[in-house]
Image (cartoon, coloured by chain):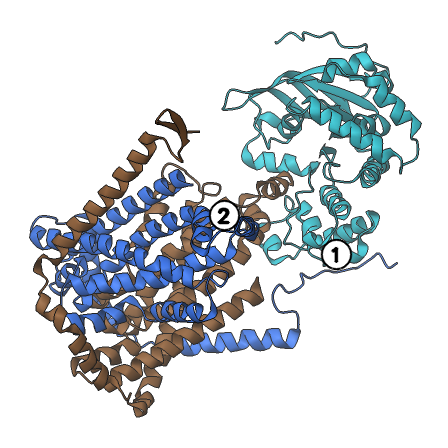
Amino acid sequence: MNATGRTWRRPPILIKDRRWRIGIYAGLLAYLVAAAASIEIDWLRVYQGLERGWRFIEGFLRPDFTSRWNDISHGLIESLTMTVTSTVVGVIISVPIGIGAARNLAPLPVYAVCRSIIALSRALQEIIIAILFVAMFGFGPFAGFLTLSFATIGFLAKLLAEDIEDIDSSQVEAVRATGASWWQLVNYAVQPQVMPRLIGLSLYRFDINFRESAVIGIVGAGGIGATLNTAIDRYEFDSAGAILLIIIVIVMVAEYGSSTVRKWVQ
Amino acid sequence: MPARPVARPPMPARAALPEIAALLKIESLTKTYKTGDKALKGVSVEVPSGQVVGLIGPSGAGKSTLIRCINRLVEPTEGTVRLGELDVTRLSRRDLRRARRRIGMIFQEYALVERLTVMENVLSGRLGYVPFWRSFMRKFPPDSVEKAFALLDRVGLGEHADKRADALSGGQRQRVGIARALEQDPELLLVDEPTASLDPKTSRQIMRLILEICRERDLPAIINIHDVVLAQDFTQRILGLRAGELVFDGPPDQLDEKALTEIYGEEDWTAMRRRASEDEDEEPMHHSERELVERLEGLS
Amino acid sequence: MPIATHNGTPVWRQRTSRQSLAIWAGWLALVALFVFCWQVMTKDTIWAFVQDAPRQAADIGSRMVPPRWSYIEKLLVPLWDTLNIATLGTLLGIVFAIPVAFLAARNTTPSVWLVRPIALFIIVASRSINSLIWALLLVSIIGPGLLAGVIAIGLRSIGFVAKLMYEAIEEIDGKQVEAVQATGASASQVIDYAIVPQILPTFFGVAVFRWDINIRESTILGLVGAGGIGLQLQASLNVLAWPQVTMIFIVILATVVVSEWVSAKVRHAII
């Protein structure tokens, strides 16, 4: 065996064929160049913006909670109540839809209907749903509540259905072998297996709903987002900073709380 | 200085060669973990050049900790570790990295970087010698690459250089681990349970390979191993560790029932010996070795 | 096992009385909270509008069909912009997320008490604030346009990518790290040889996943002036051009479906 002068190069990680590799990388590079070129930057405007950006950072560091406190507290209450009600309603509706969308429990027609509801809810983003609901139900938190409830269904029912499809089928068989009815089957074989996950997902969705409630206000669906929008429009960066800090703190608290509850449940 | 509570068996002539300066000199090494567990309670031992030492003892006796204190993967609490003239325990981070290059280590369950190729794993033995950019670009000096190929040939994996490590079998992976340690050009080999999770036959092959390599290079090694029969068959000197203290130090043939009881506690050791001596072939060894392993595990 | 006595005979129960009482109290509290929130929320709701909603929905529905198919010509350039916002924003986010992830992971951070909390705060701040809000801020700061959109998407992506990455870093196999350290490797070499190979699959998966989400989010950034197809949506909504709105919805929906398909394919190919 020739033992001298052997060299070694690391074999390519992703694409083994040389031509494909060069072709794909060159294509990606060309796309990136074209994409970067498509951004027209008005440097003068950006330069002017630096001063405002600095003011925003200052506002964030020295937030002003007091001068707009009425608006802030009003928006915050709307956001929080919207979050609570929409999460509860969303979960209640998600459970039957989730069960219906689980192939191992539901007959095909029910499965198809439930899956299409989920697909519809997931494909449309919160903002777009909010625009439609605001147009139908008028401005205010009620439209926001409907938006978040609808969005919760797509999220929760899908994950619940996947959980149900993943459950240990031997337990289902064992309960079925006792001669249990469909309802008893769900109660005894399915519920104990997915309940902790369902509670965990509901809490997780609570987080998401709060975060989203801060956004849909921008299109008029109530909540803290409307207050934030106004503050930014008026260039009141110290009030905007205060609102953002409140959002961050609430999200942190909700995340910490939900992780504690999830540990406790499991 | 903690007094050694148990009298050592007399040192055999082979184990302590006073005329040769010890390469590795451990003095009253103590390790207390943050949890308050005392893993080592003043261990002192010397290893001369070229000697292969087996370190035995029940689980939790501090075997792993002792080995890791030598290259400071675990920081010792007290005591010194000398490698030649170098006091390893007093080195700065930078000098410690230089010292680690001189100490090759072979791990339990291989500890290969699973998603890198075999070659990258072997070449990682050179990391202490090359600047970051070279290692990042995988542009190792030609002699390192040549050495890596030679080592792979030596351990019988010449054909597998560009395979990913996780595509190999257990025995093959441990061979890569050996090649990685040797790629460092070590002056001392630390071997931590090299045969855990290997089947008995492969275990013996791996032990034989390690021993052969140590002989070829006159390389001293400390092999931490829970399998007493393997330790006796393949090492020149045996250290028995129990609850962080050295309770045996002698050649393998002095490891009698009394010594084993000292290390592991009461058990019918004659049964183990009988079986081990009955099955000289490798194949029938499986049974007794497995039983022994199970029994020793049960003791811990 | 909790057993109650009923007429002198023991009866099996699933829970003790105290446990079931606590659970009932919990549910009761939840119901009370819901009712309270509902009342606060609907205090200012004009129910006439709500009752009128089905009629409104029918009205808007009838205006929305048929979609104005020819409008698609004017949507191609905004669609291209949307794609670019998502891609460049994802790249921007990743560039910042990688160092943040290493600073936040317990096993790679230089300081658990000083640097790690800062990195974690960056992650939570970025995650708490939706890209639309970032866009709102940036449009106000650097003016409307694609740049604001790219930065907004980037800022939002930092937290998402960094969080998943630092969790992956904390879950790596420590033995592989130990083995590389034992060769005398420096800290940067340990990252390169022992940590990066272990987190690379997660990294690509997360990046592609986030790109998919970013496509979705960048379709609406135009609502606040940050470029892309959302600008057209805003313009059409302002003039109540519902057939155009439908067309935009169709295009957005198609884009989202295609990007989801692409990301699933790419993730499958990589991992």
Q: Colour of chain B?
A: cyan
Side of C179 where C55 appears, left or right: left
| Mark sitting on residue C250 | none
Percent coordinates x, y for residue B242 in the rendering = 68, 17
Q: Colour of chain C?
A: brown
Q: For mark 1, what is the residue?
A: B161
The blue one among the chains is A
Up the image or down, B107 lies above or below C5; here it is: below
Residue in view at x 16 percent, y 80 percent: C238
Q: Residues within 10 Å of mark 2 (few under 14, many from 20)?
A: many
Quarter assignment of residue C219? bottom left
Up the image or down, B170 lies above or below B87; here it is: below
Residue in view at x 80 percent, y 38 percent: B203
- Residue type (three-letter) at the residue carrying disc 1: Ala
B272 or C232: which is nearer to us?
B272
Q: Residues within 10 Å of mark 1 (few under 14, many from 20)?
A: many
Q: For mark 2, what is the residue?
A: C169
Up the image or down, C224 lies above or below C68; here it is: above
Side of A115 where A153 appears, left or right: left
